[in-house]
Amino acid sequence: MQISNFAEAGQFAPARIAEALRTTRDEVARTVGLGRDAVMRPDRIASAKTQKRLREMVEILNRVEPRFGSALIAYAWYRSEPLSGFAGLTAMQLVREGRAAEVMDYIDAVDAGIHA
């Protein structure tokens, strides 16, 4: 799925993300480690922290979607599949801890054949 599908007026839109992933904005907020207000109030949606977390999740989903064939399956992986080398943490848990760059490096390594 194209990143532009998740954006509106030049920023990531929680409502569009929720719609594409067939979930709620509240769930999107929990998934990236933000409070409900961060995805409901326009001023909070526009904040750097909210936009960063939403961008990180979308980038990770876009990197793994080709592997799974759909954004919904990629989202299920993101939320539930423990990553080897991260003490059983999922991509979602790592993003919530501010470790999205490590998840992206892991995905790149798997794609390059370094991790199985």
Image: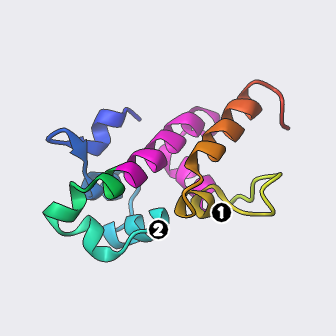
Residue 28 in the image, given as x and y percentages of width and height? 40, 64
Residue that extends furthest to the top in the rendered view of this protein: 112
Instruction: Identify the amino acid type marked 2.
Output: Gly
Q: How is the image coloured?
A: rainbow
Left or right of 109 in this view: 103: left
Question: Helix or strand or loop: what does disc 2 sit on?
Answer: loop
Residue at image coords 71%, 40%:
106
Location of mark 1 (residue): 80
What residue is disc 2 on? 33
Residue 65 vertical placement versus 36 (above, below): above
- How far is the residue under mark 1 from the one under mark 2? 15 Å
Along the horizontal axis of the image, is 81 left or right of 6?
Answer: right
Question: Would you call the spot at circle 2 few (<14 residues within 10 Å), some (14-19), or many (20 or more)?
Answer: many
Residue found 29% across the figure and 34% down from its top: 4
User: What range of the chain is rendered magenta?
Assistant: 52-80
Location of residue 56 in the rendering, given as x and y in whole percent from the top left corner = 46, 46
For residue 1, the mark is none
29 part of magenta stretch:
no
Secondary element at image label 1: helix
Magenta stretch, main secondary structure class? helix
Badge 1 or badge 2: first in the primary sequence? 2
Number of other residues with Cα within 10 Å of mark 1, as a class: few under 14, some 14 to 19, many 20 or more:
few
Against 15, residue 57 (above or below) is: above
Q: Amino acid at mark 1?
A: Ser
